[in-house]
Image (cartoon, coloured by chain):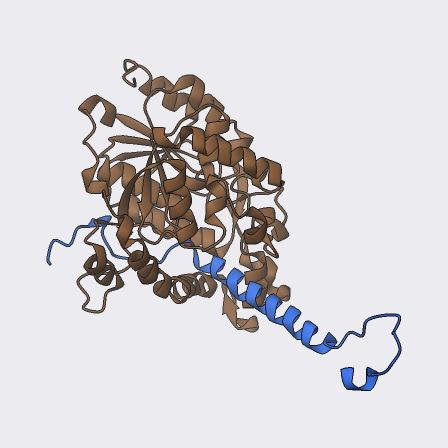
Chain colours: A blue, B brown
Amino acid sequence: MSEFLKGNFQIKNQPKESTKAEMTKEEELKEKFKKAALGSIGGSMVYVERTELTWDGADE
Amino acid sequence: MNNSESGWSFEQVVQDVPKIGRENHSQTLLHHAQENLKYFKKSINDLKALPEIEKESAIVISAGPSVHKFNSINRIRDNYKGKIISIDGAYVNCLKRGVIPDYVLSLDPHLKRIVRWFGDPNFEENMAGDDYFDRQDLDVEFRKNSINQNLANIKLVNEHAHKTKLILCSSAPPQVVDRAIEAGFDIYWWNPLVDNPSEPQSLTRKLYAVNKLPCMNTGGTVGTAAWVFASSILKIKSIGMVGMDLGYHMDTPYNMTQTYYELIQHVGLENLEKCFIRFTFPLTQVEYYTDPTYFWYRKNFLELLSKSNSENLNCTEGGTLFGEHIQSMTLDTFFNRFNKLENYKE
C-alpha cells in the first residue's frame, strides 16, 4: 500500500498498512490463550488409578 | 447423565479428564524437573519427624469457597494449636488472617498463574488476556486483585515466608521457584507420582531418574497432595480438612466455574447443563454441584483415602467430598476433640 502513497505532500493520517496482519495477530493471540486455557479441564496434575500414595524408587 | 443422543455422557467427559491432563502436563513435568535440578537441596525425606504428640492431629487448609463462607481460617486461628498444612491458593488468605502455616504445598506447573498465590512480580504481564482468576472460586479475593493488592501480597509473603516450609513439587514453573527463593521459604522438594513406576516407560520413573526425589501421589490436585503429605510423610493420625469443597455452591453461576470455556469447547454450549451434577452434603443436607474435573478429583481422593492409615475428618462443612473412608464433622467438633490436648505448639 505504501508505494501508492509516495509523493511530495504530507498526508493527514498515517496509513494503516497492516490491518489484515493485525487481525491475524489478534486471532493468533486468541488462539494461543484458548489453547493455554484448555489445560484446566485436565486438572492441575497427571493422575492414574491404582498407584500407591508414595514411591521412593525402592526397586531401582 | 447418559446423553447418548448427543454422542457423549458425563462419564465420558470424566474419563477424558486424565487424558487431557496427560497431554497437557507430560512434557512440562520432565522439562521443569530438569530446569529445577539446580535447586534441589532438600527433599521431603529431609523433614525432621514430628514428635508423637504433634502427630495426633493436623489441619489441611484447602481453598474452596467454604473457607470464606464458614470463616474457617479465623476459627482455626482462634481455636487450634496443632500443625497447619496449607495449599498455595490458601496461603495468602491464611497470612492475612494471622495464621502462619507450618507447611505450604504447591504443584501446578502452569507457567503464569500459580506465582500469583505468592504475590506475582510480573502481575500485569502474566494476567494479560487471562480471566482464570476472575472465574476461580478458590479465593474470591483474588478475583478483584488489583496491582496494589498484589504488591501487598508480595510484601506479606516476603515478611512471613521464612517461617514456613514450602513443600514444592519438581513440576513447579520457573516463576514460582524464583519467587519462592526470593521470598525466603525453606524449600523441600518432591516428585509427583503420575503413573505406575513399575512400567518401563513410566514418567514417574523418568522423573526419579532425573533427580532421585521421593514421589508422592497427588490425586490430580494440590489439596489432595496436601492430604497425602499429612498422612504419608508427616504420619498424622487424625487429619482435619477445610476448604475441600470439590464442587460449587448452588449460587455460583456456571460461567464462574473453573472449566466453563473448556467444557463448552469440549461438549458444546447446548450440552453444558448436563456437565454439572448435584450432591447433597450429608451433614447439612445442603445441595452442591460439581463439574467433571472436580468430580474426577473427588473420585481420585476417595480412592486414595482407602489406602491411608490416618483418620480423615472433613470439616469443610459443605461440598461434595464424603464417602466410606472420610467422616464429616463440623470444625467446632474437631476443635473440641483435639484441643483437649495440651497446647503443644511453640
Q: Position of residue B222 (x, y in %)?
A: 38, 46
Image vertical order of residue B18 relative to residue B55, above or below? below
Do we see residue B307 in this rendering? yes
**Quadrant (top left, top right, bottom left, bottom right) of the C terminus of chain B:** top left
Where, by quadrant of the figure, is residue B30 drawn? bottom left
Q: How many marks?
A: 0
Q: Nearer the viewer, residue B235 or B316?
A: B235
User: Which residue is more in the foreground, A14 or B327?
Assistant: A14
Q: Residue B65, image x and y in percent?
A: 53, 38
| For residue B199, side relative to residue B59 (left or right) | left
Going 37% across and 51% down the picture, which residue do you hit?
Answer: B172
Residue B161 coordinates in the image, percent (x, y): 39, 32
Whether B210 is drawn above or below B218: the answer is below
User: Which residue appears farthest toward the left when viewing the image?
Assistant: A59
With B135 as the anchor, is B80 left or right in this view?
Answer: left
Q: Nearer the viewer, residue B326 or B150?
A: B150
Q: Residue at x 40, y 27 (%)?
A: B100
Q: Residue at x 29, y 59 (%)?
A: B34
Q: Is residue B69 above or below residue B16?
A: above
Residue B282 in view in this figure: no
Please state if B213 lies on the left or on the right of B66 as rendered: left
Residue B286 in picture, x, y percent from top left: 54, 37
Tell me the quarter of the picture where residue B329 sits. Answer: top left
Q: Residue furthest front?
A: A8
